[in-house]
Image: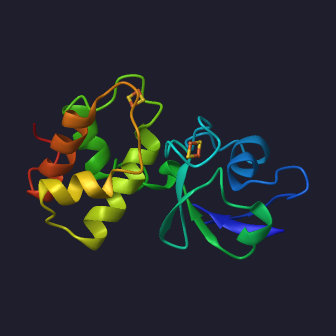
Amino acid sequence: MRFTVNGSPRDVDPARSPTLLAALRDQLGITGPKLSCDHGECGACTVRLDGELVYACLSLTAACEGTQVQTVEGLANGNALHPLQESFITHDAAQCGFCTPGQLLAAATLLEQKPHPTDDEIRAAMSGNLCRCGTYPKIIAAIRAVADGAGGAP
Ligand code: FES
Ligand code: FES
């Protein structure tokens, strides 16, 4: 079966990888989405499926035929990082970085839907992405800076 990943058509065998997360990581070598809880609690596996945030560990590969999948690898524009990626770097918003791909996709989706969110709206939008390192204040600050037009500046 075939779907599009970050703009490129890709073929996978759903029998080998029942979940989208496994298909991306094990068959396509796309390792931005992380395997952590594997049952829809942490958000480390977050990708966008036809523009909607989903947990790839809960998404069936067989149901993704013909869809558009975006992972964190598709967030930058060529060599130019997405403003949120720049801002996460300048605000030191990652420690181990395991949650960061999912955090970035959730934040990008928020700002596309609501370019000037309140802090409460940022917290609500990011509530599906846990960070075991506890970098939440810096994640909020990084998103806040982009929303306020400060780009990557701390
Ligand atoms: S690995 Fe999918 S939600 Fe935790
Ligand atoms: S930076 Fe380590 S889990 Fe978030």
Residue 141 vs residue 127, the one in the foreground: 127
Q: Is residue 95 above or below residue 154?
A: above
Residue 69: image x %, image y %?
A: 59, 64
Q: In this view, does 152 lie above or below 1?
A: above
Residue 76 visible somewhere in the drawing: no
Residue 4: image x %, image y %?
A: 66, 67
Residue 18 visible somewhere in the drawing: yes
Which quadrant does the N terminus fall into?
bottom right
Residue 38: image x %, image y %?
A: 65, 41
User: Could you tell me which residue is drawn at 71 percent across and 69 percent down?
Assistant: 64
Residue 131 vs residue 31, the one in the foreground: 131
Which quadrant does the C terminus fall into?
top left
Residue 20: quarter of image: bottom right
> On the rendered structure, is 7 left or right of 9?
left
User: Could you tell me which residue is drawn at 26 percent across and 64 percent down?
Assistant: 111
User: Could you tell me which residue is drawn at 26 percent across and 36 percent down?
Assistant: 136
Residue 27 vs residue 14, the one in the foreground: 14
The residue most toward the bottom is: 66
What colour scheme does the image use?
Answer: rainbow
Q: In which quarter of the image is ligand 1?
A: top right
> On the rendered structure, is 9 left or right of 118?
right
Q: How many labels does the image show?
A: 0
User: Could you tell me which residue is drawn at 28 percent across and 30 percent down?
Assistant: 135
Residue 82: image x %, image y %?
A: 32, 52
The residue most toward the right is: 15
Q: In this view, does 53 lie above or below 39?
A: below
> On the rendered structure, is 142 left or right of 125?
left
